[in-house]
Amino acid sequence: MKINKLLGVLFFLVGLKVILIQDWNSNWIEYSFSDNYLYIPIGVILIYIGFKFFNSIPQTEEKISICPKCQDSFEYDRLDEGKCKNCKDEKTIDIKEYYKNN
C-alpha cells in the first residue's frame, strides 16, 4: 500500500517535470522536447499513472465458507454467526480448509 503511494507521487512529479521543464535528463538518457509538443501527452500520461497508483485500492479476498452437511457455499459476510442458511444449526467452515481436508 505504501509503495503504491510512493510510486504515485514519483510518477506525478516526473509528469510535472516533463510538462514544466520540457526535457528529460537522467544518467542514461538526455532528451529535449523543445522541437515538438510530445511532452504534453507524455506528461499527462505520467500524471494520470501517478494518480492511478496513488488512489489504488488494495484488493481484499472474499471469504467464502461451505456447509459440510449440505455442501452449499456462501459468502461469510452474509451469514448469521457463521451458521448455514439451509441447515440453520450447522456451522460453516472456510472453503479452503474444506478442500484441504477432503
Image (cartoon, grey):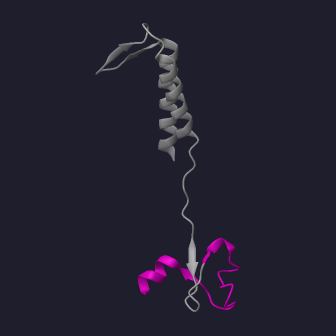
Residue 27 location in percent, x, y? Answer: 30, 20
Q: How many marks?
A: 0
Relative placement, left or right, of 1 versus 88 is: left
Task: Pick the quarter of the image with the C terminus.
Answer: bottom left
- Residue sitting farthest toward the left: 28
Residue 9 location in percent, x, y? Answer: 52, 32
Q: Which residue is drawn at the image coordinates 42% and 81% (left, top)?
A: 100
Quarter-of-image position of residue 86: bottom right
From the viewer's perspective, is residue 13 above or below residue 39?
below
Residue 35 location in percent, x, y? Answer: 42, 7
Relative placement, left or right, of 31 versus 76 is: left
From the viewer's perspective, is residue 1 above or below residue 28?
below
Relative placement, left or right, of 83 versus 21 is: right
The magenta region covers 74-102
Q: Which residue is drawn at the image coordinates 33% and 15% (left, top)?
A: 30
Q: Which residue is drawn at the image coordinates 63% and 90% (left, top)?
A: 90
Is 97 in the magenta? yes
Residue placed most toward the observer, 12 or 32: 32
From the viewer's perspective, is residue 57 above or below residue 43?
below
Q: Which residue is drawn at the image coordinates 57% and 92% (left, top)?
A: 69
Residue 29 location in percent, x, y? Answer: 31, 19
Is 1 in the magenta? no
Residue placed most toward the observer, 38 or 31: 38
